[in-house]
Image (cartoon, rainbow, N blue to C red):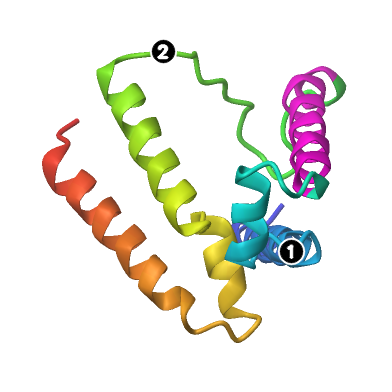
Amino acid sequence: MNPNTLTFSKALVTLLAGALFGFGLSLATMVQPEVVLGFLQFKDWGLMLVMGGAAGLAMLAYKGFPRWFARPLLGGQFLTQPASWNRQTVIGSAIFGVGWGLSGVCPGPAIAALGTGNTDILWALGGIVLGALAHGLTTRD
């Protein structure tokens, strides 16, 4: 396959996957912080079904694709990430959880919410960007 065609194919698949992801978040109402906060306060169980379905599908794909296909359809190889818990993982998870619980905003739905015209979400996105920047400046690999 021509390298330019492969690059275009990867870009197109990435664009389609992102659009599908954003559509799914919007359809599941995860782009509305008040719905997410209702879920986190155990008032709305609809998102539990959405998240359970997404986790199940992701687990099926993560475990099944390497068995069903010799290699990824667009080249490369299947990669696995070994689970490792350390202090940074615990602290980062806690900060993410507190931020999500206080605002009802997660990075993926926040970006998708821009497509719905919710410009108030820019404040949350600004905080997400600042947090990512602070992490990048303080973490050395």
- Residue beneath disc 2: 84
- Residue beneath disc 1: 29
Secondary structure category for the residue under label 2: loop
Please provide percent x and percent y for residue 40. Answer: 61, 44
Please provide percent x and percent y for residue 132. Answer: 29, 52
Secondary structure category for the residue under label 1: loop
Q: Report the span colored magenta.
A: 47-67
Q: Is residue 126 above or below residue 120?
A: above
Whether residue 4 is visible here, answered yes or no, is no
Q: Nearer the viewer, mark 2 or mark 1?
A: 1
Residue 114, quarter of picture:
bottom right
Residue 109 belongs to the span the image colors magenta: no
Please provide percent x and percent y for residue 113. Answer: 60, 73
Residue 31, quarter of picture:
bottom right
Quarter of the image for the C terminus: give it.
top left
- Side of 25 where 139 appears, left or right: left
Give, as a three-letter code, the residue at label 2. Answer: Ser
Q: Residue at x 25, y 60 (%)?
A: 130
Secondary structure mostly seen in the magenta stretch: helix
Q: Is residue 41 above or below residue 14?
A: above
Q: Nearer the viewer, residue 135 or 46?
A: 46
